[in-house]
Image (tube, rainbow, N blue to C red):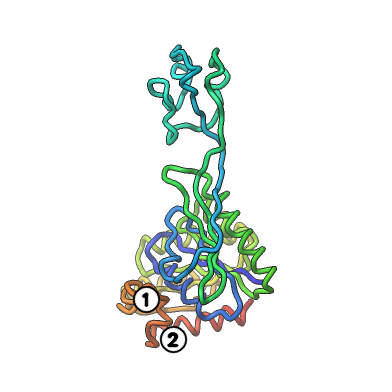
């Protein structure tokens, strides 16, 4: 199987809309949403949840009120201010276990921290793996790795040709986890100075990990000068620009309907997406 991960240096470039369109165009595939901090591919892929699993990451302290004698040593030694009036504030607890060590009455115990959930869903396009990270929770890179591994397992079981991954924006830990061992990264950008700057950062990340890359310029006619600047940058680094999608309100209307844009209309931006997928399909 081949994995295509759709990334962007910044949010709001249209990455998810393009990933959803690829989910329609690819014939035999599994979809994965690795933007676990703010997952939204599920909004465009009507789905039915088949499996729901808790995601455990680290541990959190709990104080047994029956055993606690309010000596407040735990409050005194906690460097994260995670204990207030002999009660653990779970959103602040780092799970270091120091309170467990200093409590003279063995009133503190450590428990697995439920940091979110991950799901396996069925769509009319194929199987879909996605997740939801809890509020104020970390370890998003670990959850991304879990989502990708499950998608690979399903793809292997079903002899799928592709895994279409909607990656997170930026260049942090979730993006790094999304890129690991991917076959190709499609970098979606737009003709603004901010997007160009962030494109350079995520392109550097792909080079660092040895992942082939291609670029799609969304809203390419928003600023033609900036579009040309992005094309020159890509030409200098031998990165193919495989898509130039003009501004069109059909994307917004498709999102309002909760469907991929390639199923909403067949105008020129959609034809550009179809050509882009044909190129990626032939390349890998």
Establish if 273 lies above or below 229: below
The quarter of the rendered structure image containing the N terminus is bottom right
Instruction: Write down the quadrant of residue 251 in the picture.
Output: bottom left
Instruction: Check residue 2 in the rendering and tell me which mark sits there, or answer none.
Output: none
Q: Which residue is at 59% across, 74% downward?
A: 29
Disc nearest the viewer among 1 and 2: 2
Image coords of residue 73 (percent x, y): 47, 14
Identify the residue position indicated by label 1 in the image: 220
Q: Closer to the camera, 162 or 123? A: 123
Image coords of residue 7 (percent x, y): 49, 64
Q: Is 78 situated left or right of 284 in this image? A: left
Q: Which residue is at 37% across, 85% downward?
A: 265
- Image label count: 2
Q: Is 191 situated left or right of 67 in this image? A: left
Q: What element carries label 1?
A: loop
Identify the residue position indicated by label 2 in the image: 271
Q: Which residue is at 42% across, 76% downward?
A: 260
Q: Distance between the residues labelled 1 and 2?
A: 15 Å
Q: Which residue is at 50% across, 84% downward?
A: 275
Image coords of residue 279 (percent x, y): 56, 82
């Amino acid at each position: 199987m081949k994995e295509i991960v759709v990334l962007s240096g910044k949010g709001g470039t249209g990455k998810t809309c393009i990933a959803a369109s690829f989910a329609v165009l690819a014939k035999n595939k599994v979809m994965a949403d690795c933007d676990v901090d703010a997952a939204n591919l599920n909004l465009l892929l009507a789905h039915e949840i088949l499996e729901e699993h808790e995601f455990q990451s680290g541990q959190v302290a709990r104080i047994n009120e029956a055993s606690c004698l309010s000596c407040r040593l735990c409050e005194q030694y906690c460097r994260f201010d995670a204990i207030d009036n002999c009660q653990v504030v779970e959103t602040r607890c780092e799970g270091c276990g120091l309170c467990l060590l200093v409590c003279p009455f063995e009133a503190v115990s450590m428990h697995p921290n439920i940091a979110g959930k991950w799901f396996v869903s069925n769509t009319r396009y194929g199987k879909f793996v996605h997740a939801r990270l809890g509020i104020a929770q970390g370890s998003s890179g670990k959850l991304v790795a879990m989502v990708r591994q499950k998608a690979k397992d399903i793809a292997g079981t079903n002899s799928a040709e592709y895994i279409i991954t909607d990656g997170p924006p930026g260049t942090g830990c979730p993006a790094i986890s999304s890129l690991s061992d991917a076959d190709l990264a499609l970098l979606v950008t737009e003709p603004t100075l901010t997007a160009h700057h962030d494109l350079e950062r995520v392109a550097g990340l792909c080079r660092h990990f040895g992942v082939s890359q291609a670029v799609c310029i969304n809203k390419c006619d928003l600023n033609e000068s900036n579009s040309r600047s992005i094309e020159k940058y890509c030409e200098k680094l031998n990165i193919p620009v495989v898509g130039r999608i003009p501004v069109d309100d059909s994307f917004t209307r498709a999102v309002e309907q909760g469907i991929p844009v390639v199923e909403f209309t067949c105008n020129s931006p959609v034809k550009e997406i179809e050509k882009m997928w044909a190129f990626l399909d032939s390349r890998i």
